[in-house]
Image (cartoon, rainbow, N blue to C red):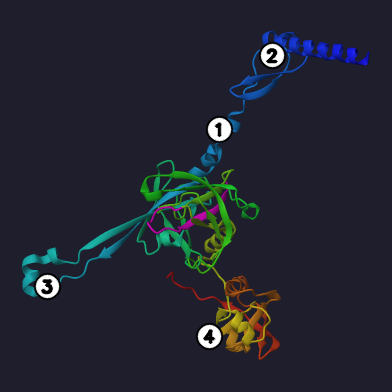
Amino acid sequence: MLRKLWLVFAQAVTIALALLLVVSTLRPDLLPFRTQTANNGIVTITESGSTQPKAASPQFLHPSFSAAAQKAMPSVVNIFTSKQVKTPRHPFMDDPLFRRFFGDQLEDDAQRSSSLGSGVIVGAEGFILTNNHVIEAADEIEVALNDGRQAVAQLVGTDPESDLAVLKIQMGQLPAVTFGRVENLLVGDVVLAIGNPFGVGQTVTMGIVSALGRTHLGINTFENFIQTDAAINPGNSGGALVDSEGNLIGINTAIYSRSGGSLGIGFAIPVSLARQVMEQIIQTGSVIRGWIGVEVQDITPELAESFKLGDTRGVLIAGVVRGGPAERAGVRPGDVLVEVQGRLVPDSFDMLNIVAGTRPGETAKLTVVRAGERLSIDLTVGRRPSVKRR
């Protein structure tokens, strides 16, 4: 009996499903509930009685960063520099007979060499941030805006150790870039590089953040680079690296290349460092950093064993500048510096940054290991001497 009832129930369900399939295919409007319709391979849920399926979102089908590019592009400028290069003096210039007949034709011939790069408008009043190597040794600096306007720029100041420079142009209110928060940046985030590669005109390339906090590259004295695979080529230097919302997160500075073209390894100065340097240059014309007057080297496992340190943290004082803050405080060659202001010193790079971030004139407490004993030394920090880019 139960078997017969089960067969009847199964047949009824099968017939009902077949009827539902036919009706939903031929007359879906007769159904009192939602149905699914196909639209170019995308299944969309529609309400009963609807004649048009919901269109798929264009942003979902075709992701675009045009809004970010349009936001940042007006703030990125092209920079053209030139300098006068004199040819060697003609050997017969001091001969009166030759000067009589040839006169000014043998005078020193001056030629001009030119180069190009990019920059970012960081202040509506006309301040522009770029790389120091873009404008280094230039006699004339000309800036071309995204809208075609051009102006001669004045140099406000430079910082060769971070490879940054600030220019200013007089053109009224200008479209300043919006600063982003680099501390929120993650490896894998989409970024756009905007600049003037090879002088072809303003160009936008896309990539991702490949790495953060790149140091020990030997490019600058102070390094903390954002690495990206966005195409960066000669002429992009000084241009903007922006996030997917068009906010500035870095200044494009260098590429790793054997041919001169992009190999997908580019480096940008994070906006946090660039902003600190920029503000000091605008306020004082230069960057003020702390200095203690020592030459250091990293601790190797062999040195750690020799000095009985237990690990390789700290730096070895290899030399002390005569008359400098360290010598006056009693620091000696052979000391191992392990702490500055209570902060551990992992290596020479971190030591340099800790000291540079201390205001000149402040008293810094150093902890050194000398002959196996830990000593505390109070030192008055000096001002780091200005250096020229190598």
Amino acid type for the residue under numbered disc 1: His
Which of the marked residues, 3 or 1, is nearer the chain's N terminus?
Answer: 1
Residue 252 image point, x, y percent = 49, 55
Disc 3 from disc 1: Cα separation: 70 Å
Secondary structure beneath disc 1?
loop
* Secondary element type, mark 3: loop
Q: SS of the residue at dot 4? A: loop
Q: Residue 303, position in %: x, y?
A: 60, 83
Q: Residue at x 60, y 74 (%)?
A: 347
First to last magenta residue range: 247-263
- Dot placed on the residue nearer the N-terminal end, 3 or 2: 2
Q: Which residue is mark 3?
A: 92
Give the distance between the C-alpha atoms of the residues marked 1 and 2, in whole angstroms: 26 Å
Question: Marks 2/4: CA distance?
Answer: 84 Å
- Whether 187 is drawn above or below 21: the answer is below
Whole-number angstrom distance, CA of label 4 to CA of label 3: 49 Å
Amino acid under label 2? Ser
* Residue 214 or residue 301, whichever sits in front: 301
**Residue linked to disc 2:** 50
| Residue 196 visible, this angle | yes
Q: Report x, y in % for residue 185.
A: 62, 52
Between marks 4 and 1, how big is the CA–CA gap? 61 Å
Q: Quadrant of the C terminus?
A: bottom left
Residue tagged 4: 321
Q: CA distance from mark 3 to mark 2?
A: 95 Å
Pointer 2 with pointer 4, Cβ within 8 A: no
Q: Can you identify the residue that label 1 sits on?
A: 62
